[in-house]
C-alpha cells in the first residue's frame, strides 16, 4: 500500500459498567473521500458478522450509501478480486471502476476469546432469629473481540482510515442470582454491534483539521 496520510489507532476496552478508551479516538477526515458511495467487502474470518453490521450502520448516515454486499461479492468473484484485510492497490481501483464506489472498507476479525473466572462470595443467611455466613459460588464471564478496519480511497489507492479495535465485556452471576450470563456467541454479537456503531459515528463526524 502507498503510505497512508491518515492513520488512526483506536483501542477500546468495554467493561460491564462502562467503556474506557486509550488513546482517545480521532475522527475520520471525510474530505479524504471524493464521494459517499462506499463498499464494505467481506472481512477475513468474520465469525461476528461484522461485515453486515458495518454496512447496516453506515448505510444512510450522513448521506453515505453502501452498495449491496451480494453484488460486490459477485463482481469480485467474476473479476478475480481477492478479499483481504488490506486490499491490493490495483484491486481497490478495479472494484471502484466496476461499482462506482469512492471508498472500500475491508478488514479482519481475530478469533473471539472467552474467559470464565470462578470464585466465591460470602452471604449472610437468616432464618427466624438465627443468622449464619455461607459461601456462594459465582462466575465472571469475559468475552473479547479484536478487529482491524481499513478504508481505501479507490481513486488514489491510499488508506484514508485504519484502526485496530479490541473490546471486552464482562458479566457476573452467582448461584443464588436469577440473572444469567450470555453465551460466547451472544457476547461477540454485542461487541461487534458496538464496534460497528462506533465506526459509523466516527465516519459521519465533521472532519479534523489536517495535521499532515
Image (spheres, helix red, strand yellow):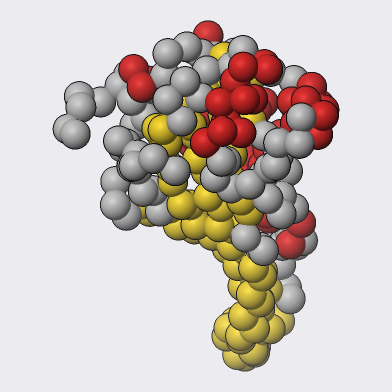
In this picture, residue 93 sits left or right of residue 66: left
Nearer the observer, 133 or 81:
81
Name the quarter where the N terminus is drawn: top left
Residue 49 locus on image (x, y percent): 73, 43
Q: Quadrant of residue 72?
A: top right
Residue 152 locus on image (x, y percent): 48, 32
Residue in view at x 48 percent, y 52 percent: 165
Nearer the observer, 193 or 103:
103
Nearer the observer, 60 or 188:
60
Residue in view at x 34 percent, y 42 percent: 3
Q: Residue furthest top?
A: 63
Residue 43 locus on image (x, y percent): 67, 44
Residue in view at x 63 percent, y 47 percent: 84
Residue in view at x 70 percent, y 42 percent: 82
Name the quarter where the C terminus is drawn: top left
Q: Is residue 129 visible?
A: no
Q: Residue furthest left?
A: 211
Q: Is residue 175 above or below residue 21?
A: below
Q: Quadrant of residue 25?
A: top left
Nearer the observer, 164 or 96:
96
In this picture, residue 96 sits left or right of residue 67: left
Q: Is residue 27 above or below residue 7?
A: above
Residue 112 locus on image (x, y percent): 66, 63
Q: Is residue 147 visible?
A: yes
Tally of marks: 0
Amino acid at each position: 500500500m502507498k503510505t497512508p496520510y491518515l492513520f488512526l489507532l483506536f483501542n477500546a476496552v468495554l467493561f460491564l459498567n462502562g467503556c474506557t478508551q486509550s488513546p482517545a479516538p480521532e475522527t475520520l477526515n471525510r474530505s479524504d473521500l471524493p464521494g459517499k458511495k462506499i463498499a464494505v467487502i467481506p472481512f477475513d474470518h468474520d465469525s461476528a458478522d461484522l461485515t453486515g453490521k458495518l454496512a447496516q450502520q453506515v448505510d444512510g448516515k450522513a448521506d453515505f450509501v453502501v452498495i449491496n454486499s451480494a453484488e460486490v461479492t459477485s463482481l469480485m468473484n467474476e473479476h478475480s478480486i481477492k478479499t483481504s484485510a488490506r486490499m491490493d492497490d490495483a484491486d481497490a481501483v478495479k472494484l471502484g471502476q466496476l461499482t462506482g464506489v469512492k471508498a472500500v472498507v475491508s478488514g479482519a476479525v481475530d478469533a473471539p476469546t472467552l474467559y470464565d473466572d470462578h470464585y466465591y462470595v460470602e452471604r449472610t443467611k437468616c432464618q427466624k432469629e438465627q443468622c449464619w455466613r455461607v459461601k456462594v459460588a459465582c462466575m465472571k464471564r469475559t468475552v473479547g473481540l479484536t478487529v482491524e478496519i481499513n478504508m481505501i480511497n479507490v481513486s488514489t489507492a491510499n488508506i484514508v482510515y485504519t484502526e485496530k479495535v479490541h473490546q471486552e465485556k464482562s458479566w457476573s452471576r452467582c448461584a443464588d442470582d436469577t440473572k444469567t450470563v450470555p453465551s460466547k456467541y451472544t457476547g461477540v454479537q454485542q461487541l461487534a454491534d458496538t464496534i460497528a456503531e462506533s465506526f459509523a459515528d466516527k465516519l459521519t463526524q465533521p472532519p479534523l483539521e489536517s495535521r499532515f
